[in-house]
Image (cartoon, rainbow, N blue to C red):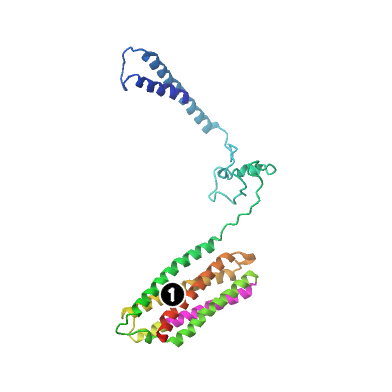
Amino acid sequence: MVIGFNMTFVIQHFLGLLGMPRRVFTYPDLPNWGWMNMLSTGGVFFMSASALILVWNLATSFFRGKIAGDNPWDAWTLEWATTSPPPHENFVALPPIRSRRPLWDIANPDRPDPIVGENSAVVTLPDHNKIGILSFILSEAGFFAALILAYLYFYARPQAGPGPKELDVPRTLVFSICLFASSFTFWRSEVALTKQRRGSMLAWLALTILLGGVFLVGQGTEYWKLFQTGVDLSTNMFSTTFFTLTGFHGLHVLLGLIALLIFLWLAWEGDFASGRGESAFKSVGYYWHFVDVVWVFVLLTVYILPLVR
């Protein structure tokens, strides 16, 4: 096929350099044009015969050919490590990678690569759960920072109508203590999970959920009292920024409680046996501690700052 192709078209290229135009049905009897065109025509027949052989080979292979194995080329790279055709999951487990030719290493365990040599390093992949939740926390911290700055901006420009004096600070402090205490109880549940103390882990986690729920109830009752006095989201800039900031935080607490309830159910079903799921559980812990830390800044900004000003 390659020979016939080059006999046909490379010769035509040289004929073009000699001045022969394309797509002509005849040509003058100039030096070298005749035999070169004859040779090019022979290349066409040569290429056609090669194409027929290719078609015959494809048909024979399709109807009567042997079934190819998983690695008919005896290749060394990972795409040939699975079956042919591959299953939906591709690989049940990735083989150990010690060099540039992993399949050769598996087939020849006693013959290390003379260039790379024996593998002497242990590569530990990063915890994807931890990286994911920390990235999310970083983005959410930016949102909270913007909301706190917006609140401070309008707080520094007092307007007519309700303001921070409408808030029940002592009552909020009590509910805040419940939220802060939930960080301690969650930490105790993490310790219990690490030590495989299922009962203790369930108890501390349930207490964490209870304390977080108490905080949400406290925040909801505060909203209700403000609504009863005619203060809502559209009353003035204070109420708008207050409800937006504390409501955004309350939403994060609610989402955290939903996640904790899911993990409580999983722990009750025994899904955390033998350390399984510990990384995901700790990632939720990062989120829960973040929610508590954010409330420290919200509490200082919204409730404590007006008292010391």
Residue 160 lies, with reference to residue 139, above or below; the image says: below
Residue placed at 47% from the left, 71% from the top? Answer: 255
Q: Position of residue 83 (x, y in %)?
A: 58, 44
Q: Residue placed farthest to the front in the image? A: 309
- Would residue 2 be visible to someone looking at this image? yes
Amino acid type at circle 1 is His
Residue 48 visible at all = no
Residue 257 rendering spot, x and y as whole percentages: 50, 73
Question: Quarter holding the C terminus?
Answer: bottom left
Q: Residue furthest right?
A: 110
Q: Which residue is drawn at 42% across and 17% down?
A: 39
**Is 99 placed above or below 304 here?**
above
39 shown above or below 278: above
Q: What element carries label 1?
A: helix
Q: Residues within 10 Å of mark 1 (few under 14, many from 20)?
A: some
Magenta residues, start to end: 197-220
Task: Reply yes or no: does residue 218 show up in magenta.
Answer: yes
Task: Report x, y in % for residue 33.
Answer: 36, 15
The image quarter in which residue 199 lies: bottom right
Residue 234, given in percent of the width and then of the height, sits at 31, 78
Question: Dominant secondary structure of the magenta stretch?
Answer: helix
Question: Left or right: where does residue 94 sit relative to residue 215?
Answer: right
Task: Count all numbered tags in the image, as a single digit.
Answer: 1
> Does the magenta portion include 260?
no
Snapshot quadrant of residue 74: top right
Quick one: 3 or 92, which is closer to the camera? 3
Quickly name the residue at label 1: 249
**Residue placed most toward the observer, 91 or 56:** 91
Instruction: Tell me the quarter of the picture where residue 306 sits.
Output: bottom left
Horizontal placement of 30 versus 180: left or right?
left
